[in-house]
């Protein structure tokens, strides 16, 4: 696990390029405090410079990067883990290929040397890497199937930058980048900005399952998809599918537990983290370490579930209870480390559990991705209900009743209870089969036109993703899952885990994020995933005999924190500074009357606007830090 940076520059001053590269690398020190590595090469008038920071996990003694091939004509810097590298290495050795190290980095390099860029499709893992091939005068920059590892890029007339984190690019530009209209609108709809966009104009994020092919002779690049996602359906009995799923899941847990350093699991007590912790404990002769976090606000605390699982698998369990004061100490560092606005409030406890966990282990397995892979979200069920609802309730009746229901369901406290969820479901209803785009809009949904000034509005903000996925009007669970793979998984979940864990120099691995599992789930009938009210049905059926009766059916809130309350207390003064009229007038982005009323209604307790106000707060915190 590391961070990578790179520059392709026509600047003839090699020392200037080297200085920029070292600056980029130092900015991501936290991603790899164990060691660093650099290579600077020249091709005619072009300088190719690559660097990395390393968090040593595998092959501690000989895995230093960059790694060159035997004739020094191909070189790689790599961030991540390849879980099938031992199998790939054996295949290459059977063809006469030799190795100097025991690292997965060298396996990628030698695999590319034999098979070219088509080899990228053979990799099972989380990764972002760049390869400079002198023989072909090309640089290849690649990102994994789900987008677990980040990769940003920027090009101007003289330079092409790429980096694991935005700060390495933005801090090397001559002027502060402008705000992207697409990024701005996506952020306020979703509460984050998914690839290929960022909040910055002309700085992009390489999409998951893609690679950049940079031609040094032509000084331009093309972007290609790596894997074609399989969606073939199979005729398989439920009992057989259940057995196959369990085998694949356990194999994935085992492959993601290869490490030369101490390893444990995040254990929230939910279905996914409980299955991962169970699987890892069964594969180890010694007790494993499990880690969970709770809250001093009782309605948000669910540590009873993690305690039960920890006792069942006999783990060394570490539980940490956090309060608002714990968040206040770290909130500035946590939020600004994302380098762009990011309003998933679960990033706060994720950072803290990673911070505490790093005191004990260097690698943690997580349950991330289980809901996307096997259909575990309430929004999938709500999506299915939309078609039933709209076929029974006429549009004019829904429109008339919605305003009344919104008032009745208004809450004053941030508790994310049934009233909150019902209100969200009602407002997501759509009679043009675009309801799912409303469901995933966790921020201002259709209110961005009230929030933003007219010249900042981007119409049809989801068009890129509708065209990319080929799903403009999703109707099925498999279509919902595919949209989530492109948007919320890549742009929210994986960003949150990567930044918060790497800020603590902790590597997180997600056994559910396995291309084999994803395609297996794609091949199953939908009612194997979502059967009646049972979400993740086949996953829970596959493992139910391993847990106490009914345990996997228990509801769970998720990793939520009471930010709505905190905005009224410890964060109130800062929030109020963000709605001062002179500041808003100078900023010239927001409709002042609307945002003032929204924030003040929340602060006075008139209504709970936690999601919207938190989304606004995190944007302004980022904005003030960069532009003011």
Image: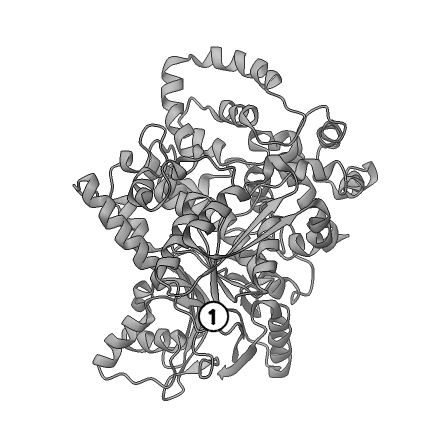
* Residue 303 in the figure: left or right of residue 544: right
* Residue 209 in the figure: left or right of residue 160: left
Q: Residues within 10 Å of mark 1 (few under 14, many from 20)?
A: some
* Residue 180 in the figure: left or right of residue 507: right
* Residue 87 in the figure: left or right of residue 351: left
Q: Is residue 228 visible?
A: no
Mark 1 secondary-structure assignment: loop
Q: How is the image coloured?
A: one colour
- Nearest the viewer among 499 and 360 is 360
- Tell me: residue 579, above or below residue 508: above
- Tell me: residue 95, above or below residue 406: below
Residue occupying image coordinates x 48% and y 10%: 397
- Nearest the viewer among 383 and 453 is 383
- Tell me: residue 144, above or below residue 392: below
Q: Is residue 219 visible?
A: yes
Give residue 446's position: percent from left, percent from top: 56, 29
- Nearest the viewer among 586 and 562 is 562
Give residue 129's position: percent from left, percent from top: 44, 69
Which residue was labeled with disc 1? 219
Q: Dividing the picture into quarters, in which one does residue 443 lie?
A: top right
- Tell me: residue 115, above or below residue 596: below
Residue occupying image coordinates x 35% and y 62%: 283
Q: Dividing the picture into quarters, in which one does residue 20 lie?
A: bottom right
């Amino acid at each position: 696990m590391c961070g990578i940076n790179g520059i392709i520059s026509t600047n003839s001053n090699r020392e200037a390029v080297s200085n920029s590269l070292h600056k980029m690398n130092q900015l991501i020190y936290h991603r790899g405090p164990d060691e660093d590595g650099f290579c600077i090469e020249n091709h005619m008038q072009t300088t190719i410079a690559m660097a990395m920071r390393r968090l040593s996990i595998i092959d501690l003694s000989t895995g230093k990067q960059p790694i060159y091939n035997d004739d020094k004509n191909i070189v790689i810097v790599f961030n991540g883990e390849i879980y099938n590298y031992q199998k790939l290495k054996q295949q290459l050795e059977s063809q006469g290929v030799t190795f100097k190290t025991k690292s997965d980095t060298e396996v990628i390099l030698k695999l590319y040397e034999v098979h070219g860029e088509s080899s990228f499709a053979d990799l099972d893992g989380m990764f972002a890497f760049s390869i400079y091939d002198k023989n072909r005068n090309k640089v290849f920059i690649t990102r994994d199937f789900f987008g677990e590892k980040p990769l940003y890029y920027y090009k101007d007339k003289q330079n092409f930058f790429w980096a694991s984190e935005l700060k390495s690019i933005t801090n090397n530009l001559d002027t502060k980048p402008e705000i992207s209209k697409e990024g701005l609108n996506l952020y306020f709809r979703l509460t984050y900005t998914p690839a290929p966009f960022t909040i910055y104009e002309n700085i992009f994020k390489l999409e998951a399952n893609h690679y950049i092919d940079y031609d040094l002779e032509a000084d331009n690049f093309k972007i290609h998809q790596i894997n074609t996602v399989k969606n073939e359906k199979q005729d398989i009995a439920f009992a057989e599918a259940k057995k196959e799923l369990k085998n694949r899941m356990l194999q994935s847990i085992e492959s993601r537990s290869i490490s030369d350093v101490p390893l444990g699991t995040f254990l929230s007590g939910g279905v996914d983290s409980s299955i991962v912790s169970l699987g890892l404990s069964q594969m180890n002769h010694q007790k494993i370490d499990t880690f969970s976090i709770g809250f001093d606000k009782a309605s948000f605390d669910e540590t009873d579930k993690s305690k039960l699982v920890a006792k069942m698998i006999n783990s060394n369990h570490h539980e940490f209870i956090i309060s608002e004061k714990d968040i206040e100490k770290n909130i500035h560092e946590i939020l600004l480390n994302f380098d762009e606005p990011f309003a998933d409030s679960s990033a706060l406890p994720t950072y803290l559990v990673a911070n505490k966990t790093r005191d004990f282990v260097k690698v943690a397995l997580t349950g991330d991705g289980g809901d996307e892979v096997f259909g575990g979200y309430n929004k999938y069920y709500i999506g299915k209900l939309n078609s039933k609802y709209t076929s029974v309730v006429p549009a004019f009746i829904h429109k008339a009743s919605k305003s009344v229901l919104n008032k009745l369901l208004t809450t004053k406290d941030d508790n994310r209870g049934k009233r909150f969820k019902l209100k969200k479901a009602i407002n997501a209803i759509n009679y043009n089969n675009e309801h799912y785009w409303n469901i995933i809009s966790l921020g201002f949904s259709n209110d961005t036109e009230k929030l933003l000034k007219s010249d900042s509005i981007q119409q049809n903000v989801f068009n890129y993703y509708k065209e990319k996925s080929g799903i403009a009007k999703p109707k099925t669970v498999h279509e919902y899952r595919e949209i989530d793979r492109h948007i919320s998984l890549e742009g929210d979940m994986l960003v949150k885990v990567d930044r918060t864990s790497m800020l603590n120099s902790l590597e997180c691995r997600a056994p559910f994020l396995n291309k084999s599992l994803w395609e297996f789930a794609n091949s199953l009938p939908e009612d194997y995933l979502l059967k009646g009210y049972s979400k993740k049905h086949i996953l829970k059926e596959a493992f139910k005999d391993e847990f106490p009766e009914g345990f996997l059916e228990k509801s769970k809130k998720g990793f939520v924190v009471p930010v709505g309350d905190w905005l009224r207390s410890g964060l109130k003064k800062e929030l109020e500074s963000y709605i001062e009229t002179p500041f808003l007038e100078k900023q010239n982005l927001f409709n002042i009357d609307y945002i003032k009323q929204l924030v003040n209604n929340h602060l006075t307790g008139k209504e709970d606007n936690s999601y919207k106000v938190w989304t606004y707060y995190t944007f302004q915190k980022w904005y003030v830090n960069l532009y003011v």
